[in-house]
Image (spheres, grey):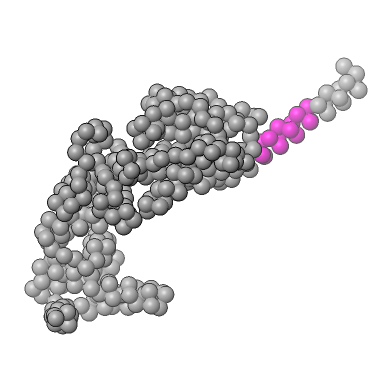
Amino acid sequence: MSKRHALKRAAKVAQRKKLAAERRKAAVAESQMSLATRVRRMAVAPMHSCLIGEALFEIGSGYLVLARKALDGRIAMAIFLLDTYCVGVKDVILRVDVASKLEALIQGLDDVQPMVAIEPARARKLLRDLVAWSRSIGLPPHPDFTTAESLFGDVSVDACNDSFEFGKDGKPLLMRGPSDTPARIRKRIEALRRTVGNDGFEYVLEVGMDDDEDLFDNDADTDQFFDGEIDDAVESATGLRYDPHVAPVSARWLEIDEDERIMLVEAYHRRAEVGVPNLKVHAIIENQVAMGDELPVRRAIERLMGGGLDRHDAVHAVGSVLAAHLTDTLKANAPNNEAYNAAVERLTAESWRAEFESTAEDEDP
């Protein structure tokens, strides 16, 4: 090999190494970007597919898939789980991966419900109209909706003149899905009651209930029945049945969600037909008891019980201190945990009885 050829070959090798290094550097830089940034960058890639569940409007639930494919073979995909009867955009999956993996995912969705092509402009208008409608009844879309919707890029909804009808027979119809927790269902029920009223929506309690089965009237008896169903569901899901007279197992109590703790507290009080001023405060006191000697609350509960209160009243007593502390925090715009702990340490059965009796007298007509 001549010296000239050797130099040319060495130059080519060096150039390949440089390009490989630049590709590796770009790959590392991209891996450090947020998923939202990567999706926005892929919004200019050629359209790969835009699909929708064939039976979406017939059964009220299905997927909408948008995918773009870059020149390097990667696909950016946004999958929207839609509920056209009530919730709107229930879930969002965002992925940027090699084509083979995401095409397999599309095939899996097609196995669940046949997917058919939809014009991207029509798909985007459907999403925006559905989100606007669900917001109007108090149900915002999944938190990742805006990021996922940005994958549509410059697709304009002005290219679609179609209109869509949502709800079932003129009303929102809330259906419990397989992944819906009792806490999530209760929040949606409360939102619907605030926005459309008790008579403004319907609901079914179980997945797969046929249309000809009863859709319960929103009267007091039905509300109690539904509340009982939710209470049973959250107790079954958590494996706990709350009783304020007995301290919950600390580790088990702390590992469940805050919404579930509040619902367990509410379930007890509803079952016992006992009112409680603030369910969240009640649950927080149990959280603080479960934290052990980190805070003075567990010791205060024991001290109050030693002073003659039952455990339920002791929880309410410490809860009254916490409620006052939260009010002071809002006024001062800064928490004073030392003052709260000191107030809990000072609390006695006698001081709480005096305060409780004074409050009761003030509230008498």
Residue 317 in view: yes
Total tally of numbered discs in the picture:
0
| Left or right of 269 in this view: 160 | right
Residue 15 in which image quadrant: top right
Residue 32 in view: no
Residue 43 in which image quadrant: top right
Residue 318, compared with residue 6, is above or below; it is: below
Quadrant of the image containing the C terminus? bottom left
Q: Nearer the viewer, residue 50 or 358?
A: 50
Q: Nearer the viewer, residue 204 or 214?
A: 214
Q: Position of residue 73 (x, y in %)?
A: 61, 28
- State the predominant SS element of the stretch in magenta: helix
Q: Position of residue 9 (x, y in %)?
A: 83, 23
Quadrant of the image containing the N terminus? top right
Q: Nearer the viewer, residue 305 or 225?
A: 225
Q: Position of residue 194 (x, y in %)?
A: 31, 57
| Left or right of 203 in this view: 58 | right
Q: Which stretch appears magenta?
A: 13-26
Q: Position of residue 300 (x, y in %)?
A: 20, 71
| Left or right of 104 in this view: 177 | left
**Residue lying at the far top of the rendered structure:** 1
Residue drawn at (39%, 41%) of the image: 166
Residue drawn at (10%, 59%) of the image: 272
Residue drawn at (37%, 35%) of the image: 61
**Residue lying at the far left of the rendered structure:** 308
The answer to whether residue 278 is magenta is: no
Residue drawn at (16%, 69%) of the image: 314
Residue 329, compared with residue 175, is above or below; it is: below
